[in-house]
Image (cartoon, helix red, strand yellow):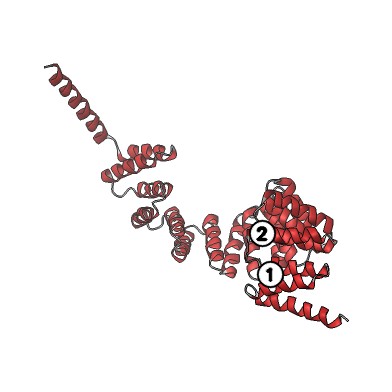
């Protein structure tokens, strides 16, 4: 009898709870769904959005935010469907088009993403985030002029957007417009003097165009702002090489290797510096270590051969040339020509 009474009480409670939920307005359910999503409870949020949509199928915002919940769960195809439903209900919904573009981007459907962002812009001419994402998508596809034009619009709308200046600079580099790239990196730094990425990229393009002091200054600033960023030390060492500051290059490569002991290229570069300094034993050791990490490193064999030549050991250099034949014929030919030239002048 007691058991039957308890079951009856539970049934009544559930009936009242269901009736209470049934009486909730769809807008109230939608608000609760948003709270669940913002709390990271995305599965529950989706169930709540679905309940709100059952009560009010034309609630476009519920479809949009359900799509965002799907995005949070990395269910990108479900997100695309939700965003498209929001757009079908509200064809001028710029935010839905923007999020649709993000979802397509996650699916690597970059052309579809660009088209969605363009639709967002049709309904909001100053949608800076949409222009920004178009720029990123075009850059990934190597469409650098379109990327520049997109970032032009971002900067028109948000002149203080330092990230847009950096991304436009990257696109300029893709077009071979290094002067413009340098200007944009400097503008980004002016807007944000602690922008490590801007300093790093400025260092890269400066090394590329032979402005080694500018590169050294940029990498040095990056290293001071982010001492754990090993890329700054690798680039700084390269800039020191360009400036013929061999001791500084040596110590900087050593610091970098301390942070990245499995980087074969760093050992090759260090071996080159050692050879330039006349430290032949250390040069051989560095190049040998590079080959331990990457046995098919043509540059390591080539630099090892040059070091043996500097030591007067033509036989050991010839052995490296023979190994290079199987790895890099171009470097093998260069080393062979050096060997032949030395042999020609020997008595």
Where residue 185 sits, quadrant-wise, is bottom right
Answer left or right for 261 relative to 106.
right
Q: Nearer the viewer, residue 156 or 163?
A: 163
- Secondary structure of residue under mark 2: helix
How much space separates mark 1 and mark 2, taking CA atoms? 31 Å
Answer left or right for 341 relative to 124.
right
- Secondary structure of residue under mark 1: loop
Q: Earlier in the sequence, mark 1 or mark 2?
A: 1
Q: Nearer the viewer, residue 306 or 83?
A: 306
- Residue positioned 46% across, 61% down in the render: 108
Q: Quadrant of the N terminus?
A: top left
- Residue positioned 78% across, 68% down in the render: 308
Q: Which mark is residue 267?
A: none
Q: Measured from the top left, where is residue 331 in percent x and y?
A: 70, 74
Q: Measured from the top left, where is residue 184 in percent x and y?
A: 69, 60
- Residue positioned 13% across, 21% down in the render: 4
Q: Which residue is mark 1?
A: 177
Q: Nearer the viewer, mark 1 or mark 2?
A: 2
Answer left or right for 150 relative to 43.
right
Where residue 97 sits, quadrant-wise, is bottom left
Q: Nearer the viewer, residue 269 or 92?
A: 269
Q: Which residue is mark 2?
A: 264
Q: Measured from the top left, where is residue 347 in percent x and y?
A: 88, 81
Where residue 215 sits, quadrant-wise, is bottom right
Local crowd size for mark 2, using a 10 Å CA cut-off: few (<14), some (14–19), many (≥20):
many
Image: 318 above or below 58 = below
């Amino acid at each position: 009898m007691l058991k039957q009474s308890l079951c009856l009480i539970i049934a009544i409670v559930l009936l009242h709870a269901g009736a209470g939920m049934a009486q909730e307005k769809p807008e109230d359910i939608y608000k609760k769904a948003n709270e669940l999503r913002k709390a990271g409870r995305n599965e529950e949020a989706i169930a709540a959005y679905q309940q709100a949509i059952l009560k009010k199928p034309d609630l476009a915002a519920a479809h949009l935010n359900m799509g965002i919940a799907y995005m949070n769960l990395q269910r990108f195809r479900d997100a695309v469907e939700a965003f498209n439903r929001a757009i079908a209900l509200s064809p001028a919904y710029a935010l839905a088009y923007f999020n649709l573009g993000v979802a397509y981007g996650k699916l690597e459907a970059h052309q579809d993403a660009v088209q969605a962002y363009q639709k967002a812009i049709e309904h909001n001419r100053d949608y800076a985030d949409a222009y920004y994402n178009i720029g990123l998508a075009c850059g990934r596809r190597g469409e650098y002029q379109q990327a520049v034009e997109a970032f032009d619009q971002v900067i028109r709308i948000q002149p203080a957007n330092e990230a847009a200046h950096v991304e436009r600079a990257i696109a300029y580099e893709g077009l071979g417009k290094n002067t413009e790239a340098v200007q944009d990196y400097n503008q980004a730094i002016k807007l944000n003097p602690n922008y490590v990425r801007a300093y790093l990229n400025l260092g890269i393009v400066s090394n590329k165009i032979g402005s080694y002091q500018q590169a050294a200054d940029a990498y040095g600033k990056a290293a001071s702002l982010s001492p754990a960023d090993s890329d700054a030390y690798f680039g700084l060492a390269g800039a020191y090489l360009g400036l013929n500051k061999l001791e500084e290059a040596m110590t900087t490569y050593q610091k970098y290797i301390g942070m990245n002991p499995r980087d074969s290229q760093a050992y090759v570069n260090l071996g080159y510096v050692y050879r330039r300094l006349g430290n032949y034993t250390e040069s051989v050791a560095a190049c040998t270590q590079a080959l331990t990490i990457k046995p098919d490193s043509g540059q390591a064999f080539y630099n090892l051969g040059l070091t043996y030549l500097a030591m007067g050991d033509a036989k050991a250099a010839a052995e490296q040339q023979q190994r290079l034949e199987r790895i890099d014929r171009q470097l093998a030919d260069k080393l062979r020509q050096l060997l032949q030239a030395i042999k020609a002048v020997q008595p």
